[in-house]
């Protein structure tokens, strides 16, 4: 298309077909931190529900994914890269939690987001069941980081994150055990752990729809 040189619209259409509907209760986690380490999900543990948003911005130069770097003073996962999101409040739907947390963390009003679907729930080693949603973000939207939670807001090209060649399998010692995980380093930022696991899940779905 002459007016869509980066094929943004076709990418969004393809992704929409790959996702599950926003509505409905998510199934048990199909993926998790233990998948590469002998404890695939679901493990049967009692999990705390959480939800995240993968915000996609349709730029003139292509589709990009909004990510955050967590504040350095936080007690858990300080400085790590993540999607905006967090725990569900009592009685709260997962989609509402993802939008609420996104507005709190990066100042993006839900009126600027159009949810297009969700993908594989993810079980973390810390005991959370994360339900991930994908939302299209108005390109005119402006972000504002909550300094109590977020040190930086940045965008990473969708094409880079969906390319399996950029999904690097790495390992490190954690709690006395050698742990394997995916990482997606990009321009000096180290995307790894649950965030990389979620992106890998999204990429697997996206790449299955040609």
Image (cartoon, rainbow, N blue to C red):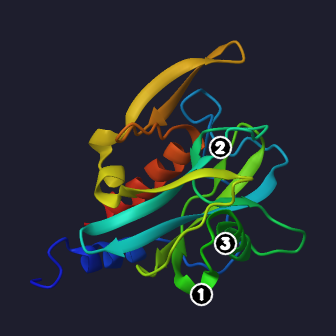
- Real-space CA distance between mark 2 and mark 1, rounded to the nearest whole angstrom: 34 Å
- Real-space CA distance between mark 3 and mark 1, rounded to the nearest whole angstrom: 10 Å
Left or right of residue 154: residue 105: right
Q: How many marks?
A: 3
Say which residue label 2 marks.
41
Q: Choose between 70 and 39: the one closer to the eye.
A: 70
Q: Choose between 206 and 28: the one closer to the eye.
A: 206
The picture quadrant where one finds residue 87 is bottom right
In the rendering, which numbered label is found on residue 111?
A: 1
In the rendering, which numbered label is found on residue 24?
A: none
Q: Are marks 3 and 1 in contact (CB under 8 Å)?
A: no
Q: Secondary structure at mark 1?
A: helix
- Real-space CA distance between mark 3 and mark 2, rounded to the nearest whole angstrom: 30 Å
Give x and y (percent) for residue 197: 52, 45
Residue in view at x 62 percent, y 34 percent: 34
Left or right of residue 63: residue 120: right
Q: Secondary structure at mark 2?
A: loop
Say which residue label 3 marks.
103
Q: Quadrant of the N terminus?
A: bottom left
Q: Secondary structure at mark 3?
A: helix
């Amino acid at each position: 298309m002459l007016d869509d040189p980066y094929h943004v619209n076709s990418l969004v259409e393809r992704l929409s077909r790959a996702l599950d509907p926003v509505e409905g209760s998510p199934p048990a986690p199909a993926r998790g931190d233990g998948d590469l380490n002998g404890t695939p999900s679901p493990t049967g543990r009692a999990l705390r529900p959480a939800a995240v948003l993968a915000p996609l911005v349709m730029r003139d130069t292509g589709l990009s994914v909004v990510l955050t770097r967590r504040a350095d003073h936080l007690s858990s996962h300080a400085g790590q890269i993540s999607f905006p999101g967090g725990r569900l409040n009592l009685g709260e739907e997962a989609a509402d939690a993802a939008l609420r947390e996104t507005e709190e963390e990066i100042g993006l009003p839900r009126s600027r987001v159009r949810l297009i679907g969700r993908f594989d729930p993810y079980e973390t080693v810390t005991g959370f069941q994360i339900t991930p949603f994908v939302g299209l973000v108005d390109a005119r939207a402006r972000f504002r980081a909550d300094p109590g939670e977020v040190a930086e807001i940045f965008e990473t090209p969708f094409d880079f994150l969906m390319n399996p060649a950029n999904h690097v399998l790495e390992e490190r010692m954690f709690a006395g055990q050698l742990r394997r995980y995916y990482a997606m380093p990009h321009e000096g930022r180290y995307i790894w752990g649950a965030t990389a696991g979620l992106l890998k899940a999204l990429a697997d779905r996206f790449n299955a729809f040609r």
